[in-house]
Image (cartoon, grey):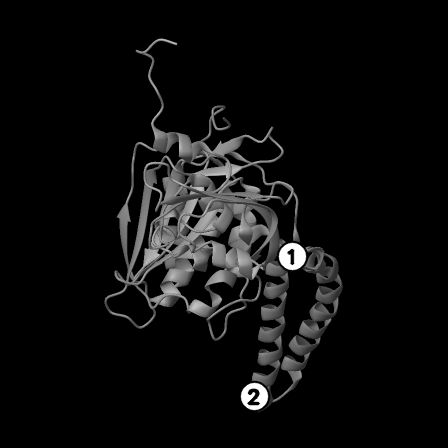
């Protein structure tokens, strides 16, 4: 081999490894996480880097948990049960000291879950059935609802003014239940999305126009676009729905705040990647990022890990389906969504990582 041949940067090599790799400092802090770690934990590198290793990796085995904190410990363990907010998954773990700096350690985690690398996607059969149930039951429930609504509208013609408010209440509640069923049916659908090239900035503008039409009062929107971005390979209508949901959440979080600001930015990043077990174990590069942020109060800590699960909400009149639908649509587009909370800056951010519309997306 020629000495003049270019040698890849070590950081690039670690970034390209298809399983999570973590660098752990002498005081047990994660100081580096590769791209696969983002996909595995469903958290951004920025969030992971700075967390304690024993608070990030929690095993069923107390012996394994204790070993994470032992200095100068080299460990190779198979079939370890790792606890996650969505259940227990089985992994192999290799923990080894850095040769020139033995107080530093590298952890390599190999999930043994049939190719699913995102903790947030680990669902048991019961949950999958629950997700599909709305598609089966929706039609049967909507039929009697239509009858109830029709009967209430007929009654409204013959009752006095005092009781007409009750019939209007029935009609409004029937419409609300029907909208809820529509959302649940979308959540239960599993057909693949129709993907095509799209200009992400035009879709963002569509979502903003829709949001402004639906809200009498809007917070300030700060936009920072990268005009050089290529087209992305997505379902355009589905992406507009994703953007509307995220922007509406930011708007709701800023309700009543005079200093509320929604930030929307786009950029080209090098870290986004998604493992695809069906494409010869290759990864799909996701270099286009959309970040939607707000300076609202954030999400309560006790629901952060369940944020994208159905029926989880902090809104008094919310249904808890918006972010579950976001994740469903994002998955259908071979993309990713990440959540961050910067307590110091007082900022909540959702990041969408999307593939470019070219034949060079898979590597």
Of marks 1 and 2, which one's residue comes earlier in the chain?
2
Answer few, some or many: residues within 10 Å of disc 1's Cα (few below 14, many 20 plus, some between 14 and 19).
some
Left or right, 25 with reference to 170: left
Image quarter of residue 115: top right
| 1 and 2 marks in contact (CB < 8 Å) | no
Q: Is residue 66 above or below residue 73?
A: below
The residue drawn where x is 60% and y is 84% is 166
Image spot of residue 145 (x, y percent): 70, 70
Q: Single out the residue that lies furthest toward the front.
A: 72
In the shown orientation, is residue 238 left or right of residue 192?
Answer: left
Q: Residue placed farthest to the left in the image?
A: 259
Along the line of sight, the residue nearer the viewer: 51 or 102: 102
Could you say which disc has been placed on residue 161 in the image?
2
Residue at screen point 39% across, 66% down: 252
Q: Which disc number belongs to residue 97?
A: none
Q: Nearer the viewer, residue 201 or 133?
A: 133
- One can see residue 267 in this view: yes
Q: Position of residue 229 (x, y in %)?
A: 34, 33
Q: Nearer the viewer, residue 75 or 363?
A: 75
Secondary structure category for the residue under label 2: helix
In the depicted structure, whether residue 223 falls above or below residue 167: above
The residue tagged 1 is: 185
Residue 205 is at least partly visible in this image: no
């Amino acid at each position: 081999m020629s000495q003049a041949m270019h040698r890849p940067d070590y950081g690039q090599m670690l970034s390209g490894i298809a399983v999570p790799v973590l660098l752990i400092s002498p005081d047990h802090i994660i100081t580096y996480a590769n791209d696969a770690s983002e996909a595995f934990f469903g958290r951004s590198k920025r969030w992971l880097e700075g967390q304690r290793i024993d608070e990030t990796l929690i095993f069923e085995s107390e012996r394994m948990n204790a070993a994470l904190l032992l200095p100068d410990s080299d460990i190779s363990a198979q079939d370890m049960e790792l606890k996650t907010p969505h259940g227990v998954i089985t992994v192999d773990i290799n923990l080894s000291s850095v040769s020139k700096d033995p107080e530093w350690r590298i952890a390599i985690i190999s999930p043994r879950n049939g190719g699913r690398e995102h903790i947030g996607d680990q669902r048991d059969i019961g949950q999958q059935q629950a997700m599909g149930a709305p598609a089966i039951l929706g039609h049967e429930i909507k039929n009697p609802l239509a009858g109830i609504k029709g009967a209430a509208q007929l009654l409204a013609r013959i009752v006095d003014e005092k009781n007409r408010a009750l019939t209007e209440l029935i009609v409004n509640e029937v419409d609300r239940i029907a909208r809820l069923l529509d959302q649940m049916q979308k959540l239960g659908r599993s057909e693949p999305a129709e993907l095509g090239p799209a200009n992400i900035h035009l879709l963002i503008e569509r979502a903003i126009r829709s949001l402004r039409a639906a809200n009498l009062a809007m917070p300030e929107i700060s936009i920072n676009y990268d005009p050089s971005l290529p087209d992305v390979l997505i379902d355009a209508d589905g992406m507009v729905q994703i953007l509307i949901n995220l922007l509406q959440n930011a708007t709701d979080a800023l309700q009543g705040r005079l200093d509320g600001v929604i930030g929307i930015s786009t950029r080209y990043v090098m870290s986004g990647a998604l493992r695809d077990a069906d494409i010869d174990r290759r990864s799909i590069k996701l270099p286009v990022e959309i970040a939607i942020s707000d300076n609202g109060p954030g999400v309560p800590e006790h629901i952060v890990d369940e944020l994208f699960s159905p029926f989880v909400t902090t809104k008094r009149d919310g249904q808890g389906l918006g972010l579950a639908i976001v994740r469903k649509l994002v998955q259908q587009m071979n993309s990713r969504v990440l959540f961050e909370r910067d307590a110091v800056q007082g900022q909540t951010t959702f990041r969408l990582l999307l593939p470019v519309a070219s034949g060079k997306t898979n590597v």
